[in-house]
Structures are given as structure tokens and as C-alpha cells.
Amino acid sequence: MNRATARQLGRFRLHALDAGIQHLDGGAMFGIVPKPLWEKKMPPDERNRILLALRPLLVETGDELVLIDSGAGNKEDAKFHDIYGLENQGSPTALEDAIRDAGFQPSDVTLVVNTHLHFDHAGGDTVRLDDGSVVPSFPGVTHIVQQREWEFAHQANERVRASYLPHNFDPVHEAGLFEFARGAAEIVPGVRALPTPGHTPGHQSVLIESEGESALYLADLVPTATHLPLPWIMGYDVEPLITLETKRAVLERVKGERTLLVFEHDPETPWGYLAPREERPTLVDQRPD
């Protein structure tokens, strides 16, 4: 089974990586949206959970190989896997297998960007070895995250604490590999951090631009294509009204600029463009004229 899907963006090559799946509660994933509406689009299982992808993005710029998010890692126990319906087995996880399927080795990655530090986005930043120790998965590689997200992860209250597991990111910091962005910033030429708060105060999306073309890795601002309508916001978001305004601004921008949207959690749709003349958010595969 091939775990990588590629497309060209200017002179860059984008690889959508299949790093496994998880199953999260549908009510939590759709917040105030009534179940009779969301279940038509994403049917739940007998435990009211919906199927979600874990889809990091590998950006091949020619000079850099940038990994955006890292999936859930290999450190959690059977109970954790059962609760979250997590399936990401591989060598050591499905993420590394997907990087190989894209034509690279994990050691080829030159930069890691974390949109935020929840376990399903930063879990693969570290790996548990056979002796039980936890070490960075990408030794010597700089990891970029927003300063605000780092602070929030270490001040986490009871509502969000279960999403922030220190063994996913503290060993990276202890190894001196974290670099903190403070707002919008160029990461490498053609790859920019774009603050998109709401899901967490320090959440960021990643804007990729090459030769007049652009793509936006939305992460949990718009986790699936089903979440494109403005009020379809996750119950997990700590500041949903901030999410609403962030989402409004971002979707207006990308529609006007004909930007490819990349979805981290959609189980069927890795990417697409917003049709410019449709009143309801509608995705098309090819860049609109």
C-alpha cells in the first residue's frame, strides 16, 4: 500500500503522507452542528466516532525537505489506541513508511514544522526506543512552532491537558531543536508560518508559494473539507469565536488567490481549490482560471 500522494506546486513538490487514522467523537468534531446534519457527511461508528486521517505534508523545495506535522508517534499504550481509534503501525510508524514511499528516508528531512502540539500533530516528533527511552525522531533537525503554542502547551488546564503529552515535545526542546516563531514568519524561502488561532491560541497554518502558485496547510483550522462552512467548528477549539473570524479571513483570502487547500484530517480528500463563484464552499481539483 502506497502511503504518499504527490502533486506539483510551481517548482515545489508536495507529498500528502498517510500517517494512519484515528476515530474521534463526531459530536466533539462538529461542535454545535446537530448530528442529523454532520452524520450525513461523515457517518459515525457504534461509539459515535468518525474516521479521520493523519496526513502530514512533505514539501520538497529543491533546497529543503520540510515535514509539516508528524502524526501520533509510537509511544502510547493499547488503551490510548482504543479510546482514539488510532491505527498508525509501521517502521516505527506509518509516518516513516509514508516518507519512504514518497522516495525519501526520514533522515532526509531538513526541517519539521508543528502547526500545534496536540498528540495527533506532534506525536511523531519523538520516538520510543526498544530500551524505553524517548528521543527526537529527527535528530539534529530544527523544529518550528509558535512561541504562544509552546507556552500554552505548558500551561494547559484540565480541559485541554489530555491533548498535550510532554513526551511528544519536551525531549525535542531538551535536545535544543525547537525554534519559536512569533507571528507570521518565513520558515524557508517559499514556506511561511501563518498564525491561525482559535483551535489553540498558538495554532498556525503553513503557506507554501512557488512560481505564482500557492497552497495552505490548514491543520485544525479546517480539519476536513466538511468543516469548510464557517459555523462548522470543532468542539475541541478553545476559542471558537476566534476560529470563526480566523476562518472567515483565511477562506476569503485563499478563494481570491486560488490557493490549494490541504486537509490534514479528511479521510478522502487530501486537497482541493475553492470554486470562486459558488456561494457554498465547493472544492474542485484543478486551479480555477
Image (spheres, rainbow, N blue to C red):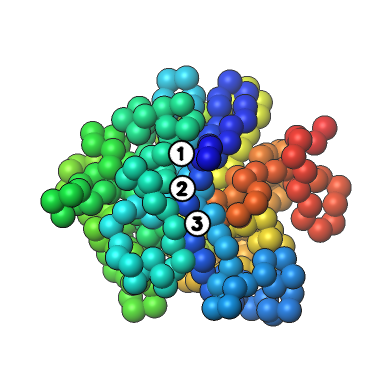
The reply to whether dot 2 and dot 3 touch (C-beta < 8 Å) is no
Up/down of 51 relative to 270, above or below: below
Query: Earlier along the polypeptide chain: callout 1 or callout 3?
Result: 3
The residue furthest front is 1
Point out residue 185 in the picture as x, y percentages from the top left corner.
44, 39
Point out residue 62 in the picture as x, y percentages from the top left corner.
47, 19
Name the mark on residue 98. Answer: 1
Q: Tell me what residue is drawn at x 81 percent, y 58 percent.
A: 280
How far apart in space, not on screen, are marks 2 and 1 (Cα)? Answer: 7 Å
Q: Secondary structure at mark 3?
A: strand
Label 3, on which residue? 21
Label 2, on which residue? 19
Question: For mark 1, does the 10 Å Cα neighbourhood hold few (<14), some (14 to 19), or many (20 or more) residues?
Answer: many
Q: Secondary structure at mark 2?
A: loop
The reply to whether dot 2 and dot 1 touch (C-beta < 8 Å) is yes
Question: For mark 2, does the 10 Å Cα neighbourhood hold few (<14), some (14 to 19), or many (20 or more) residues?
Answer: many
Identify the amino acid type marked 1.
Ala
Quadrant in which the C terminus is drawn? top right
How far apart in space, not on screen, are marks 2 and 3 (Cα)? Answer: 7 Å
Q: Is residue 271 visible?
A: yes
Question: For mark 3, does the 10 Å Cα neighbourhood hold few (<14), some (14 to 19), or many (20 or more) residues?
Answer: many
Q: Is residue 26 visible?
A: no
Q: Tell me what residue is drawn at x 18 percent, y 49 percent.
A: 130
Point out residue 29 in the picture as x, y percentages from the top left corner.
57, 70
Point out residue 239 in the picture as x, y percentages from the top left corner.
51, 70
Identify the amino acid type marked 2.
Ala
- Residue 124 appears left or right of 66: left
Q: Tell me what residue is drawn at x 49 percent, y 31 percent.
A: 102
